[in-house]
Amino acid sequence: MLEFAWWWAFLFLPLPLLVRFLWPAAPEAQMAALKVPSLRPGSSGLEEQVTKSRLPLIACCLIWLLLVVAAARPQWLGEPISIPNEGREMMLAVDLSGSMKIDDMQLNGRQVNRLTMTKSVVYDFIQRRVGDRLGLILFADTAYVQAPLTYDRDTVSTLLSEAVIGLVGEQTAIGDAIGLAVKRFDAREESNNVLILLTDGQNTAGNITPEQAKELAINKGVKVYTIGVGADKMLIQSFFGSRQVNPSQELDEDMLTDIATSTGGQYFRARNAQELQAIYQQLDALEPIEGETRKMRPLTALFYYPLTIALALSILWALVLVLKSIVDLFQYRRSDTVTERGNE
């Protein structure tokens, strides 16, 4: 929708007419003194043609109209968009180690690996976090930021869905993942910083130990929620028949519990998709989403369009006047030359 911020500027439109009728007229003698007769008998001349033309009046009126429109500050009012209230900074750290490919999870009636189930559940969680800035860290042999903190939840979801097991190795660098998250939070110390770390094993790689990473999180005020993923029981087929094993025997629950409780967070255990879904619902309650989003309509300034056109017309008209003066001067000299030859 088009609107004018200073609509009262249109009151200046009749100003040239007021000046024309209220300003005292020039004396007749002066006006007569300014008249220059044509030096070519029977010819009106370029100056007389321009004077009689309505083009100067039209150009001046158009330039003045454009200047008044520009002074009124035209602007385009866009469609309303939602602006989230100040929420929290939330990082998701997802394990991509080799053990995440174990097929001990059920999703929609089919057997899937741990990462596939994680992607399905975390996607819904990400879409619900309206108002929070979300980031994504993937870790295995080392940790790296896949998505920096952003309000663009769709991008975070897409980058998570594109993650593959073994992308950065086969081991588990839990300490590096926490340390990297703390570093990304460091720029916004006053915000509510939350890290949700999801893993299915124990720390077997990295440059920072979980204990060191925990101290960093405590010092920077980062709250860590840890989630241990993996079933407790799984049937595997062998030459001697099927047998039951514990696929999560390497999960270091003591370490994950210590990190969570020391930083003010909580440890959760996800043995299936339903439990993981319930965990993220609990996280919604523990870290509630901020209130209703605010609405705003973006404004795009348009004043420079009429201002540019007015400037271009002014320059063009000035060039026309200069050209007319050059032509008049050329004709004047030519007429003088013809007159001198006639006298001779």
Image (cartoon, rainbow, N blue to C red):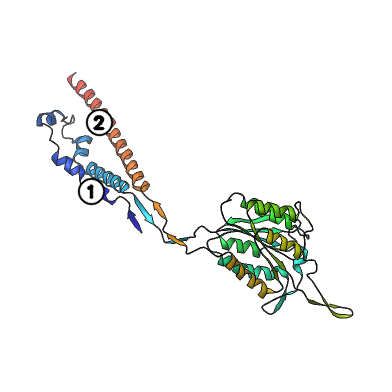
x and y percent of residue 246 in the render?
80, 73
Give me the residue at 32% from left, 47% from top.
Answer: 70
Q: How would you rate the neighbour count of disc 1 (Cα within 10 Å): few for under 14, some for 14-19, many for 20 or more?
A: few
Quarter of the image for residue 158 reads bottom right
Q: For residue 101, which numbered disc appears in the image?
A: none
Residue 21 appears anywhere in the view = yes
Q: Nearer the viewer, residue 59 or 116?
A: 116
Residue 143 appears anywhere in the view = no
Q: Secondary structure at mark 2?
A: helix
Residue tagged 1: 11
Residue tagged 2: 328
Q: How would you rate the neighbour count of disc 2 (Cα within 10 Å): few for under 14, some for 14-19, many for 20 or more?
A: some
Q: Nearer the viewer, mark 1 or mark 2?
A: 1
x and y percent of residue 142 in the render?
74, 55
Q: Nearer the viewer, residue 114 or 231?
A: 231
x and y percent of residue 265 in the render?
65, 62
Quarter of the image for residue 312 reads top left
Give me the residue at 57% from left, 66% from top.
Answer: 127
x and y percent of residue 297 in the render?
41, 58
User: Is label 1 in contact with label 2 (beta carbons under 8 Å)?
Assistant: no
Amino acid at circle 2: Asp
Amino acid at circle 1: Leu
Counting the numbered discs, the total is 2
Point out the residue furthest to the left here. Answer: 28
Point out the residue furthest to the right here. Answer: 240
What is the distance, in whole Å, between disc 1 and disc 2 at their CAs?
39 Å
Taking 296 as reference, is 343 above or below it?
A: above
Q: Nearer the viewer, residue 26 or 341?
A: 26
Give me the residue at 25% from left, 31% from top.
Answer: 328
Q: Nearer the viewer, residue 180 or 102?
A: 180
